Image (cartoon, grey):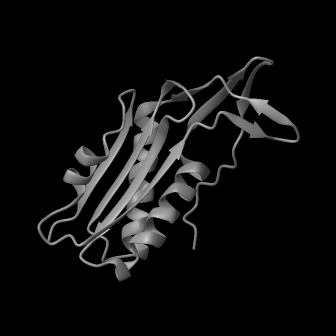
Amino acid sequence: MSKLTLIEITQDEIDLDALLSRITSVNTGAAAIFTGLVRGFTQNGRQNVTEYLEYEAYQPMAEEIMKQVAEEIRIKWPDVEGIALVQRVGRLFPQTPTVMIACSAAHRNTGVFEAARYGIDRLKEIVPVWKKEVGPNGEAWVEGEHFHEIRK
């Protein structure tokens, strides 16, 4: 059985059906999917209204590190057949999907839930994607924690 992997930085809307078709086969019986969305407000010490988020990435580097994350998933969960790591860039408004992580396998008890969770956590930790939050009180770059080693 070949392993299916989709790695993508895109300005296009994320299409769940199209994404799943690229990481599943006739042997697939389970897929776990995580989708991050733009919130209309955040609470970082005080409540902030979000008009939109502006995502930026250096695509070649970001996609290379996303491949690393997929490899880490395959090492930790060898029964995972399909992996999708898709990050949107550009101006995104509240309730818009910003990222989608999906893992597929023959059965649900093969680690697909844990693998998808690991995928989003690692994407946030090591993939060079920058996010600017824009609201009525101005704009600010939102910092994240970045680590480059493989997490155990």
Residue located farthest toward the right when viewing the structure as drawn:
45
Residue located farthest toward the bottom when viewing the structure as drawn:
109
Q: Nearer the viewer, residue 63 or 100?
A: 100
Q: Residue 11, image x and y in percent? A: 39, 26
Residue located farthest toward the left when viewing the structure as drawn:
26
Q: Nearer the viewer, residue 88 or 148?
A: 88
Q: Residue 8, image x and y in percent? A: 35, 40
* Residue drawn at point x = 39 percent, y = 59 percent: 70
Above or below residue 145? Residue 115 is below
Q: Residue 97, image x and y in percent? A: 47, 39
Left or right side of 81 for 7: right
Quadrant of the rendered image containing residue 40: top right
Quadrant of the rendered image containing residue 149: bottom right
Quadrant of the rendered image containing residue 12: top left
* Residue drawn at point x = 43 percent, y = 32 percent: 59
Total residue callouts: 0
